[in-house]
Amino acid sequence: MDLHIRPIRDGDVEPVVRLSLLAWAPVFASFRQIFGPAVYSLYYPDWEASQRAVVERTCRGTVTNTVRVAEVAGAVAGFVAFTLDQETRIGEVLLLAVHPDYQNHGVGTALNAHALAEMKAAGMNLAQLLTGADPGHAPARRSYEKAGYTALPIVLYYQELQDP
């Protein structure tokens, strides 16, 4: 596979949004199953619209974010967005997604390695990211563990307060 990682361009934003929605659909299906329909609909009334907004804002806000695109045979196959905090010397992966057609082909691994190399070259001492422990995030966790990240188990609870 001919994989090339490069800076994002304006014309990449919509393909990145589309691939991220496809890649993250299993995550939100997992959330719906875990939360149940009542809590899920309160927290994610329209997950696709909110995720679209997050990805667009992250990709277009490149003053503080670094966004790299993985390209395979001229097609956008995945992306990674990260920040570099010069004060704390911590780099943080904000978003990473791979189009389902390119998952399990090393694209996520390459994006992780590329982001970590850029962080190290920029003088960061530590890299961090946040991901879910739900079944929908299992592929992401495998990718991050493969890249050498160490997980810290954290539990986040939700409870519906209004009567349905």
Image (spheres, grey):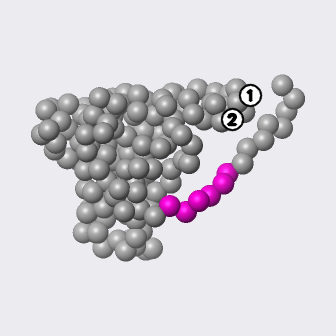
Return the residue nearer the eye: 128 or 57: 128
Secondary structure beneath dot 1 equals helix
Residue 89 sits in quarter: bottom left
What SS does tag 2 mark?
helix
Q: Quadrant of residue 161?
A: top right
Hey, which quadrant is residue 73 in on the image?
top left
Q: Residues within 10 Å of mark 1 (few under 14, many from 20)?
A: some
At 34% from the left and 58% from the top, the residue drawn is: 147
The span shown in magenta is 151-156
Disc 1 residue type?
A: Ala
Residue under pointer 1: 38
Residue 79 against residue 146 in the figure, above or below:
above
Residue at the location (24% across, 69% down)? Answer: 121
What distance separates the C-alpha of mark 1 from that of mark 2? 8 Å
Q: Are marks 1 and 2 in contact (CB under 8 Å)?
A: yes
Mark in front: 1 vs 2:
2
Nearest the eye: 63 or 36 = 36
Is residue 99 within the magenta segment? no
Pick the front one: 136 or 48: 136
Give the left or right position of residue 35, taking residue 60 as reference.
right
Q: Amino acid at mark 2?
A: Phe
Q: Residue at x 40, y 70 (%)?
A: 126
**Quadrant in which the C terminus appears:** top right
Residue 5 spot, x, y in % from top left? 20, 47
Residue holding disc 2: 35
Q: How many marks?
A: 2
Is residue 98 visible in the rendered image? The answer is yes
